[in-house]
Image (spheres, rainbow, N blue to C red):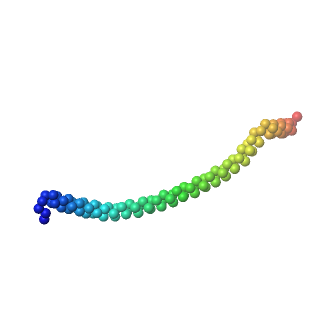
Amino acid sequence: MPSDPGSLAALIGQAMLVLALVLILAGMLLTLPRLLRVRRRALALSVEVKAAQAEALEALDRLEERRDETEEILRSMRRLRRWVRHPLSVATVQSFRRKRRRRSVPG
């Protein structure tokens, strides 16, 4: 055992350093199982998120297809509505109605 106070302090410092290293290693070993569980759960969650993202993208693709389909149907309906509401079409229908009324009215 060293007799002077300087070498005693150095010995105590080295012992404290070794103790700190042991405590750090023990803490790391104690947290390792929890860290591995968290990692496993994070990987599983990542897989689920990727699957949900792929499903959402597929749903968006289907939605876009249906929107295009609807737009095509509405385009035909709008064209028909424009034709029906056109003043010449309205006048033609009114003319036929007047002719029909004149024929059906006994006179």
Q: On the image, which quarter does residue 91 sit in?
A: top right
In the image, is residue 61 above or below residue 26?
A: above
Q: On the image, which quarter does residue 102 sit in?
A: top right
* Residue positioned most to the left: 3
- Res. 97 in view: no
Q: Nearer the viewer, residue 9 or 40?
A: 9
Look at 52% across and 56% down and name the residue there.
Answer: 53
Task: Give the percent coordinates (x, y) of residue 3.
Answer: 11, 62
Look at 69% across and 50% down and name the residue there.
Answer: 72
Q: Is residue 82 left or right of residue 25?
A: right
Look at 75% across and 39% down and name the residue there.
Answer: 85
Instruction: For the N terminus, give its image quadrant.
Output: bottom left
In the image, is residue 49 above or below residue 80?
A: below
* Residue positioned most to the right: 107
Look at 50% across and 59% down and name the residue there.
Answer: 50
Instruction: For the C terminus, give its image quadrant.
Output: top right
Q: Nearer the viewer, residue 5 or 51?
A: 5
Q: Nearer the viewer, residue 20 or 10?
A: 10
Task: Give the percent coordinates (x, y) of residue 89.
Answer: 80, 40
Q: Is residue 19 left or right of residue 41?
A: left
* Residue positioned most to the top: 107
Task: Give the percent coordinates (x, y) of residue 56.
Answer: 54, 55
- Res. 32 in view: yes
Q: Is residue 98 left or right of residue 72?
A: right
Task: Give the percent coordinates (x, y) of residue 2.
Answer: 13, 63
**Labels in figure, total:** 0
